[in-house]
Image (cartoon, rainbow, N blue to C red):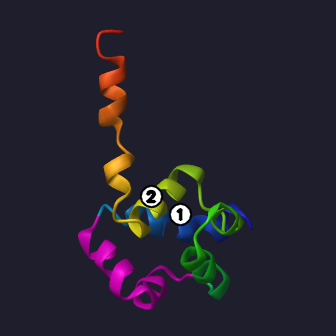
Amino acid sequence: MTGVDSYRVNQLVQELFADPANLEAFANDREALYDRYGLSREQRAAIDAGGQEALTGAGLHPVLQMHHFMATNPAAPDFVSIKAYRGLVKGHG
């Protein structure tokens, strides 16, 4: 998949948390969200499937794969946080 082909997939996932309406649509009306971003059938299937292989195949940037993970796993923010990291490095620079 080329950068041009994957641009919209990356844009959609990047904007999930930028606009609460996008995250709401992702949870409740993905087809409308996919239509708005102009995703192909293959891209939609990859986003729905999730997983590293599918998302990488759709051209989703690795950092944005974490965004997808957090959008599809409501408990993720409980264990994906820089707060724990801050505690580890406090006093070390």
Q: Position of residue 90 (x, y in %)?
A: 29, 16
User: How far apart are labels 1 and 2 at the CA level?
Assistant: 10 Å
Whether the magenta-drawn stretch holds residue 86 is answered as no
Q: Position of residue 50 (x, y in %)?
A: 58, 70
Q: Are marks 1 and 2 in contact (CB under 8 Å)?
A: no
Residue shown at 60%/76% (left/top)?
49
Q: Secondary structure at mark 1?
A: helix
Q: Which mark is residue 26?
A: none
Closer to the camera in the image, 45 or 10: 45
Residue furthest out toward the right = 1
Q: Quadrant of residue 86?
A: top left
Q: Amino acid at mark 1?
A: Asn
Locate residue 67 relative to residue 62 in the image: left or right. left
* Pick the front one: 93 or 60: 93
For residue 31, above or below residue 58: below
The stretch in magenta equals 19-39
Residue 25 to residue 91: above or below: below
Q: Which residue is under mark 1?
A: 10
Nearer the observer: mark 1 or 2; the answer is 2
The residue under label 2 is 67
Q: Position of residue 39 (x, y in %)?
A: 56, 81
Q: Position of residue 87 (x, y in %)?
A: 30, 24
Q: Secondary structure at mark 2?
A: helix
What quarter of the picture does the C terminus occupy?
top left
Q: Is residue 2 left or right of residue 73?
A: right
Q: How many dots with numbers?
A: 2
